[in-house]
Image (cartoon, rainbow, N blue to C red):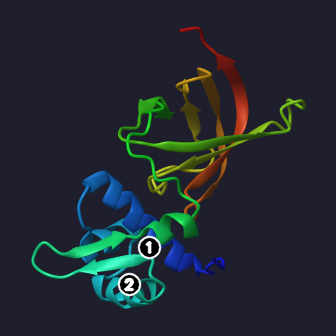
Amino acid sequence: MAAIELTSSQKKILRAVIDLHMEQQTTVKGDDIAAEVGLKAGTIRNKMQSLKALQLVDGVPGPKGGYRPTAAAYTALEVQQIDDPAIVPVRYDGRMMNNVVVEEISLSSVHHPDRCRAVIHMQEQIDTLSEGDSLTVGPTPLSRLTVKGTIERKDSVSNSITLQIERMQTTDL
């Protein structure tokens, strides 16, 4: 299957559909998507037509209707479909963030302390996070890794943040 090229707007909307669907466990209303991405409901309806044509979302008619992502949506955004994801604690400026699913932690330049970075991919919208703020992720379920750092960059389209790592540690069970 060929890769689907999506605009940043389509990616953001599709990501919101996936996140809301996982959170609500039901079809997602256009108004909810609009509130999540900061657009008007009419704009969302128009954008959803192209996502339906690409077979990335299904439209469900009726009073309990809305939209739900297809398997192709998860593939297009490289999001893992996990039935029962492990919870990895995330603290933002010292406050626990609830219902956050950390999808992946990628480390770069670990051997060089001044350049050590972590890219954290989450399944939720990251609009509430700000560059320059402190974030602690972990401990992870298996390795018990905790990463603490300052948010250097955030990408709302891919729901990822880049941390300038201040501290990394593992803890015993």
Label disc, if present, on residue 13 of the rendered structure = 1
Of the pair 12 and 152, the residue shown nearer to us: 12
Give me the residue at 55% from left, 24% from top.
139
Q: Residue furthest front?
A: 1
Q: Are marks 2 and 1 in contact (CB under 8 Å)?
A: yes
Question: Considering the numbered disc 1 on the image, is that residue within a helix, a strand or a loop?
Answer: helix
Q: Which badge, 2 or 1, comes first in the chain's sequence?
A: 1
Check disc 1 and give the amino acid type.
Answer: Ile
Q: How many residues crowd mark 2 within 10 Å: few (<14), some (14–19), many (20+)?
A: many
Mark-to-mark CA distance, 2 and 1: 8 Å
Question: Considering the numbered disc 2 on the image, is that residue within a helix, a strand or a loop?
Answer: helix
Q: Position of residue 60 (x, y in %)?
A: 23, 78
Quadrant occupied by the N terminus = bottom right
In the image, taking residue 120 as reference, residue 122 lies left or right, namely left
Q: How many residues crowd mark 1 within 10 Å: few (<14), some (14–19), many (20+)?
A: many
Residue 30 location, quadrant: bottom left
Give me the residue at 62% from left, 22% from top.
143
Of the pair 70 and 124, the residue shown nearer to us: 70
Give me the residue at 44% from left, 83% from top.
51
Check disc 2 and give the amino acid type.
Answer: Met
- Above or below residue 112? Residue 41 is below
Give me the residue at 58% from left, 76% from top.
8
Q: Position of residue 90 (x, y in %)?
A: 48, 34
Q: Residue furthest left?
A: 63
Of the pair 18 and 41, the residue shown nearer to us: 18
Residue 96 location, quadrant: top left
Label disc, if present, on residue 170 of the rendered structure = none
- Above or below residue 15? Residue 93 is above
Q: Position of residue 141 (x, y in %)?
A: 52, 25
- Above or below residue 79? Residue 76 is below
- Per the image, the residue denoted by label 2 is 48
Q: Position of residue 116 (x, y in %)?
A: 81, 36
